[in-house]
Amino acid sequence: MGVRRKLAGLRGEWRAGHLMVLVPLALIVLISVVDTSLSPDIHLGPLLVIAPALTPSFAGSRTTALIGLLAVLAQAVVAVLHGGLFTPNHEAQLAALALLTGALVAYCRVRERHGRELDQVRAVSDTVQRVLIRPLPDRAGPLRLAARYLAAADGAKVGGDLYALVRADGATRLLIGDVRGKGLDAVGDAAALLGAFRELAHRHEDPAELAHALEASYRRHLAELAADTGQDVHENFVTALVLDLPDRRPVLRIADCGHPPPLLLGPDGTRALPLRRTAPPLGMSALGPVDRRTEEFAFPPGSTLLLHTDGVTEARDRTGAFYPLAARAARLPQPATPAALLDGLRRDLLHYVGGRLPDDAALVAVRREAREAGEAGEAREGQGA
């Protein structure tokens, strides 16, 4: 069985790089033919080292070992034709080529092990993301939704930005937030807040009351964290928006906890919602009294609400200019679905910053459809259930 697995692995490598492997093979043949056709005083055999040296750039350890073995055999053939296999010069060349091949194979093994470890880390990250930040449904009542998450930490797909959705009492309740810090260090706070939201959203219809309940739950989490680990939590906080979108009224109700205002995209253009009752972020109630209020805005059918974290608007280009989200979103063609809108924004954002964000970023798009479309979607969901 071990031999079969090795042969299967070798076949896999061959399928992946069978075109590139022709390059070192051609070099072995070319160098050997030229060397044997020249004078015995001219030695091109040491150039055979190029073949196994090139192989790790596109293949694994097995293919590298095979190419190295072929190079050693070719060197032996050249030695036999040029004065004998056991001359000191040829013995030194063969030994050097064999040692270098062994070193290259060892390097490939280390690289493959690190690759497997990275794959495991990514698999764990994917699992954490699915459990912590659950994918939003495509539809929720008369709404169509989509979300995109871009984590700043290398090898991670989850960080300090968060979003969640709960269906309750004929409405969709949404949370989007940004934990102080970024990457994996902020995951614990994000997990605590998301768990509290999924439970408390069923108990509080008013966004301001829900935000008050989230504040109390988050403060308890910080107190437990400080008691268990001794960590200084005085500067831990979460900016957040808490929204309630009723199915039967074309409005949105929102409580702002120090978070950037969302954008409303519609036939009349793109504008930021003029939030006037911004409260401090969650976790800062110990600094003084907090008065959170719910604001209500029109959310007519055919319009799209774009929620985001500051990882989007604080992204900079090479000149240091911030990403102008409202202007860029307005210039994008208005696609048929929120998912297509976010895909376009994601590409545009990464191109703007040169391919990598310095901070975690999240985008959530919510489109309210006409009543007839929403009812048709609910009917299809009911038939599917």
Image: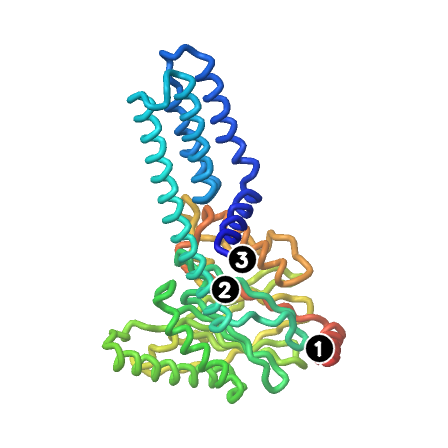
Q: State which quadrant residue 96 falls in.
A: top left
Residue at 48% in and 55% down: 2
Residue 165 vertical position relative to residue 59 in the rendered view, above or below? below
**First reached walking from the N terminus: tag 1 or tag 3:** 3
Q: Secondary structure at mark 1?
A: helix
Residue 124 vertical position relative to residue 16 in the rendered view, above or below? below
Residue at 66% in and 71% down: 368
Residue at 63% in and 84% down: 170
Q: Which residue is mark 1?
A: 381
**First reached walking from the N terminus: tag 3 or tag 2:** 2
Along the line of sight, which residue is nearer the eye, 1 or 264?
1
Residue at 47% in and 17% down: 34
Residue type indicated by callout 2:
His
Q: Nearer the viewer, mark 3 or mark 2?
A: 2
Residue 308, numbered circle? 2
Query: Residue 4, image x and y in percent?
Result: 53, 52
Residue type indicated by callout 1:
Glu
Query: Is the Cβ of the residue at disc 3 closer than 8 Å to that at disc 2?
Result: no
Along the line of sight, which residue is nearer the eye, 44 or 342?
44
Q: Secondary structure at mark 2?
A: strand
Q: Nearer the viewer, mark 1 or mark 3?
A: 1
Residue type indicated by callout 3:
Ala
Is residue 209 something that shows in the picture? yes
**First reached walking from the N terminus: tag 1 or tag 2:** 2
Query: Residue 216, image x and y in percent?
Result: 38, 85
Residue 326, numbered circle? 3
Query: Residue 357, image x and y in percent?
Result: 43, 54
Residue 123, numbered circle? none
Q: CA distance from mark 1 to mark 3?
A: 33 Å
